[in-house]
Amino acid sequence: MRTALGEHALLERLRRLVRNPPPWITLGIGDDAAIVEPDRGTLTAISTDALIEDVHFRRSWTGPGAIGHKALAVALSDLAAMGAAPRASLLSLALPAGFPVEEFDELIQGFAALASSSSAALVGGNIARSPGPLVLDVTVMGSVRRRRWLTRAGARAGDELFVTGSLGAAAAGLAMLESAVDSSALDEPERECIARYERPEPRLRMGLVIARNRAATAAIDLSDGLADGARQIAAASRCGVVIEAGRVPMHPGVGRWAQRSAADPLPLALSGGEDYELLFAVSPRQRRAFEAAAKKGGKPAVTRVGRLSREPGAWLEREGRLEPLGEGFSH
Ligand SMILES: [Mg+2]
């Protein structure tokens, strides 16, 4: 079924697919605006992100459910980096002419499932016709406690850098999709890379626990790779940064894929975007508190990957020698 449905009919479908708003949503989807009850004693963090067809995803590679999931995940990842607890989300959709209704439903279901599991209730948005690509524009709101949020700017020389999980999986997954490799020829860790590219998991709990325990001096989410994230923290905090090549936690599928495609795995981990892991700066006296809090933050575990330095610049330390750190990922 190709959609000839207008905005009102699509909104009605959307409303039926999105149910059970949490108690703080006083007025949800359907009116001119939503009403969200403030969380007592907290401040509101707000962020927005857009996914554009053929810039951030291809419909021939990624199914509509994954596209809906990812659009919300990348916006929530910014809240995770601030240490904010999600409360509400808004979705503005621009649909190409003839966008199938089944795909619309799957896209909304992908979005709504993550919205529900992460407490980012979908409270409104907009649906318009796009003259070209499919566009999903997502705004998220979360609450943070006073003085218990994280920015990129609080780090100092001597602080250590820790990253959640493993890196390079999304970039390897994208490379697999681009090369149109037969997925039955891939092994399990490699297929996991494709899943990580399509359905990133924002590290909300980890960001929240580290922020509430004041266990880090700075944080950022890795949308554009470790090298870019490290540079951003260093620049905002006015110091230099060193990444230790031997410590970078690589996703197991990255090595397999690199072998198969005769590529170097390290650049995938350093400059490959879209892993959406968190990078924290931790002062030496916070280190034990950080490690204890990170345990409470659950899986995946954190790994120390480098340090902030007095000397300016961004460096990669490999076998005891420093070389310039490469650039980040550009969509
Ligand atoms: Mg970010």
Image: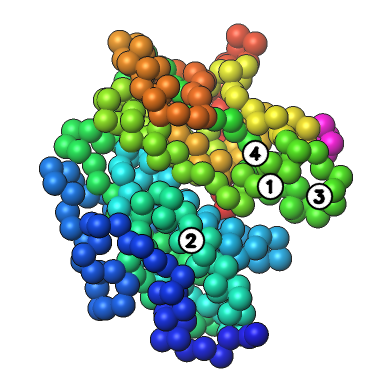
- Magenta region, main secondary structure: loop
Q: Would residue 112 be found to the left or right of residue 178 on screen?
A: left
Between 25 and 268, the one lying in front of the other is 25
Give the mark nearer the N terminus: 2 vs 4.
2
Q: What residue type is disc 1 on?
A: Ile
Is 186 drawn above or below residue 293 in the view shown? below
Residue ID at (39%, 46%)? 78
Q: Is mark 3 within 8 Å of ligand 1?
A: no
Give the mark nearer the N terminus: 2 vs 1.
2
Residue range highlighted in magenta: 259-264
Residue ID at (42%, 79%)? 11
Q: Would residue 278 be found to the left or right of residue 199 on screen?
A: left
Residue at numbered disc 4: 169
Between 119 and 162, the one lying in front of the other is 119
Q: Mark 4 and mark 1 in contact (Cβ < 8 Å)? A: no
Give the mark nearer the N terminus: 2 vs 3.
2
Q: What residue type is disc 2 on?
A: Phe
Residue at numbered disc 3: 183
Question: Real-space Cα distance between discs 2 and 4?
Answer: 22 Å
How many residues crowd around disc 1 within 10 Å: few (fewer than 14), some, or many (20 or more)?
Answer: many
Label 4 sits on a secondary structure element that is helix
Residue at numbered disc 2: 111
Give the mark nearer the N terminus: 4 vs 3.
4
